Image (cartoon, helix red, strand yellow):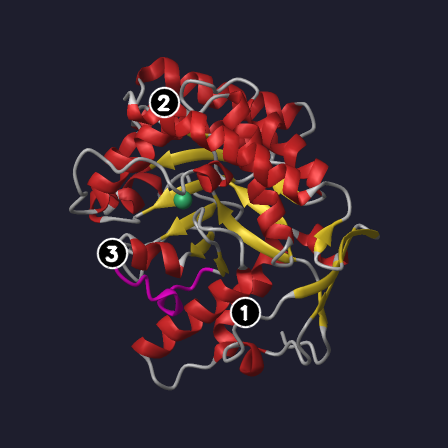
């Protein structure tokens, strides 16, 4: 979809981890991870255990602010905080609402912390969605869940009439995911990554491509054009600059196929509006004209000048209108110090 003007609807990040906003500057892991499984064990699974309600709130405030300043008005978030599960999705939703960014929340259910941890994660998804929150039922990934848990997740999502938001075949450790999920997955599922899926994996749902994260974790290129599923774009927790992610998706595609057009990566951004149609009424006025894929693929640094969400002006003159950006950055920095101190003790 090309839009020959300097405006677009609000951009959608189809896979984020707002809790990673305070990870920057965290203490180095006890040893350098040598693969994707160790990156999870030594970095992310330590960080998520250190999260408490204050760090969840301020990482969401900072992440929402950083999304807005890049023209992203709708975030599909995937959260895990095993020592602060209950109420965590509401903390994230409230923070995003304060900044003026739309969010769709999911708690990543996993059996990594035993069956009690899995059932508390399921309960948090159910509590949040039944209380009127916009969300999907989250799962970390098939390889950290029993078949019983995966069935419980699919059953809850069907009961609540929402999709499931799950990492699928991001690394080799999860290469068996398709065989375990094929009988459960539905069109409203978000299948994040898919690097190790076969071309004919047979899973229903939208594939969410995260090119920067896949490069950063050295897991390989998912080659999303090989799938018959719709494809959307996410950042996997590395900010919410969707034009930058679009440019990365384009150059990864182009590196693989010199005939590739940026219109393909742009179609991934457009799939975001199928997943989060509310963002279509949002209006972003940009520093570049036209907002057209062949222009944007070669124009780093395009920025929003003005953003309206649901008719309300939420960004103008380089600042958010509803919140004080300096105050959010200062409070988030204080929380980061506390979070990193807890990590030092782990
Ligand atoms: Zn992720």
Q: Secondary structure at mark 2?
A: helix
Q: Residue at x 42, y 64 (%)?
A: 228
Residue 1, percent across and down? 62, 74
Quadrant housing residue 146:
top left
Residue 233, percent across and down? 49, 58
Marks 1 and 3: in contact by CB < 8 Å? no
Q: Is residue 245 left or right of residue 65?
A: left
Answer yes or no: is residue 106 visible: no
Name above or below for residue 154 compared with residue 212.
above
Q: Main secondary structure of the magenta part?
A: loop
- Tell me the residue that label 1 is attached to: 267
- Tell me which segment is drawn in magenta: 219-229
Q: On residue 259, which mark appears?
A: none
- Tell me the residue that label 2 is attached to: 342
Foreground residue, 309 or 159? 309
Label 3 to label 2: alpha-carbon separation = 28 Å
Quadrant housing residue 26:
top left
**How many numbered callouts?**
3
Foreground residue, 17 or 55? 55
Q: Is residue 223 left or right of residue 312?
A: left
- Tell me the residue that label 3 is attached to: 218
Q: Is mark 3 within 8 Å of ligand 1?
A: no
Label 3 to label 1: alpha-carbon separation = 25 Å
Q: Secondary structure at mark 1?
A: helix
Q: Nearer the viewer, mark 3 or mark 1?
A: 3
Q: Is residue 203 left or right of residue 42?
A: right
Q: Earlier in the sequence, mark 3 or mark 2?
A: 3
Residue 145, percent across and down? 31, 29
Q: Residues within 10 Å of mark 1 (few under 14, many from 20)?
A: some
Label 2 to label 1: alpha-carbon separation = 42 Å
Q: Is mark 2 within 8 Å of ligand 1?
A: no
Name above or below for residue 331 compared with residue 165.
above
């Amino acid at each position: 979809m090309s839009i020959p003007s300097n405006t677009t609807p609000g951009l959608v990040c189809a896979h984020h981890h707002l809790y990673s906003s305070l990870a920057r500057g965290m203490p180095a892991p006890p040893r350098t991870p040598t693969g994707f499984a160790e990156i999870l064990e030594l970095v992310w699974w330590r960080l998520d255990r250190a999260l408490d309600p204050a760090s969840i709130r301020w990482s969401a405030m900072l992440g929402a602010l950083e999304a807005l300043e890049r023209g992203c008005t709708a975030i599909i978030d995937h959260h895990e905080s095993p020592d602060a599960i209950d109420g965590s999705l509401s903390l994230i939703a409230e923070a995003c609402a304060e900044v003026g960014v739309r969010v769709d929340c999911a708690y990543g259910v996993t059996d990594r912390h035993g069956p009690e941890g899995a059932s508390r994660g399921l309960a948090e998804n159910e509590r949040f969605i039944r209380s009127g929150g916009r969300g999907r039922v989250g799962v970390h990934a098939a390889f950290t869940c029993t078949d019983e848990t995966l069935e419980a997740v699919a059953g809850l999502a069907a009961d609540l009439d929402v999709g499931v938001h799950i990492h699928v075949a991001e690394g080799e450790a999860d290469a068996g995911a398709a065989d375990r999920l094929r009988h459960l997955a539905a069109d409203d599922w978000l299948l994040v990554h898919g690097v190790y899926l076969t071309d004919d994996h047979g899973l229903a749902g939208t594939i969410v491509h995260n090119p920067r994260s896949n490069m950063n974790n050295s897991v390989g290129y998912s080659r999303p054009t090989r799938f018959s599923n719709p494809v959307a774009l996410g950042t996997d927790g590395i900010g919410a600059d969707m034009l930058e992610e679009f440019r990365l998706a384009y150059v990864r595609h182009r590196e693989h196929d010199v005939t590739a057009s940026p219109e393909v990566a742009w179609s991934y951004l457009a799939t975001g509006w199928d997943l989060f149609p509310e963002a279509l009424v949002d209006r972003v006025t940009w520093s570049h004209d036209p907002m057209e894929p062949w222009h944007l693929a070669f124009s780093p640094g395009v920025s929003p000048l003005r953003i309206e969400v649901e008719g309300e002006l939420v960004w103008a003159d380089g600042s958010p209108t509803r919140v004080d950006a300096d105050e959010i950055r200062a409070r988030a920095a204080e929380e980061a110090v506390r979070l990193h101190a807890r990590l030092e003790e782990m």
